[in-house]
Amino acid sequence: MNPLRRYETIMEILLAQKEVTVNELSERLDVTGKTIREDLAKLEEKGLLLRIHGGAMLAQSDQLGILSAKEPIIKHADQKSEIATLALRYIQPRDIIALDGGSTTLEIARRLDNQPLTVVTNDLYIISELVHKDEIRLVVPGGYRLRNMLAGPEASDYVSKLNIQKTFLSATGVHLQHGFTIYTSDLVDYKRALIKSSAVVYGVVDHYKFGQCALRTFAELSEVAMILTDSSLADDTARQFSDAGITVVTQ
């Protein structure tokens, strides 16, 4: 197993059980404890986990773009509400929109009025939120279940044939050099399909994800029309992205 795939497997295990030991990872991945400790150190540098005595624990589950398979516990709720309110300005009746999976896009779904609208989503929590709003037409791709998401080639192929007006895209991190990133390859093709099928793409990203970089880049910064974030974004950070030609909207 190559290092990148090991990193992804480690993150998948942590997402499922929140904490893991070096010995457990060594047995499951069939590598030495030394290799696992080196892997954990690299993942900690990226802010994806915290090393503890004898193992590691997940840093922030909601920042990974995939929520718990149980009840979604949303951190930074005030910031996400702020971003959701901002996103609603860009949604008009009869639009065809896509809500990428994640806690911020879930907040957008919660705030959508029951109005004539088509919503494409692979997030089971968003589906559950919108299914009772009978004016909204839900479009759900196929695929296999990954926590609260539908992923795989079926989902990507389905989305690639759609004509989406506006996509609201989530990410684990947004970096000036590495663009929009996520920790696992399972969702890269789906996110790429959303981007290619959409007339306009908005990034919806909490302020603390700026400058962060996960394992997989799924989009360049230039592929997104603007990034919607909360007002806690530092002025210096906003200026760096603005100087790079990226539109960042906070209010």
Image (cartoon, grey):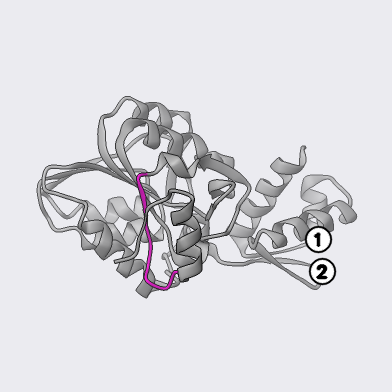
Is residue 1 positioned above or below 249 on the image? above
Seen from the viewer's position, the closer of residues 182 and 28 is 182
What is the span of residues highlighted in magenta in the rendered image?
A: 225-233
Element on which disc 1 rests:
helix
Give the label on residue 54, or none: 2
* Amino acid bearing label 2: Gly
Is residue 80 positioned above or below 161 on the image? below
Q: From the top left corner, tell me how far across and down residue 141 is, in percent.
A: 34, 35
The answer to whether residue 36 is left or right of residue 226 is right
In the rendered structure, does residue 231 fall within the stretch colored magenta?
Answer: yes
User: Is residue 62 visible in the rendered structure shown here?
Assistant: no
Seen from the viewer's position, the closer of residues 39 and 86 is 86
Element on which disc 2 rests:
loop
Give the label on residue 22, or none: 1
Q: Residues within 10 Å of mark 2 (few under 14, many from 20)?
A: few
Count of number-bearing discs: 2
The answer to whether residue 96 is left or right of residue 60 is left
N-term mark: 2 or 1: 1
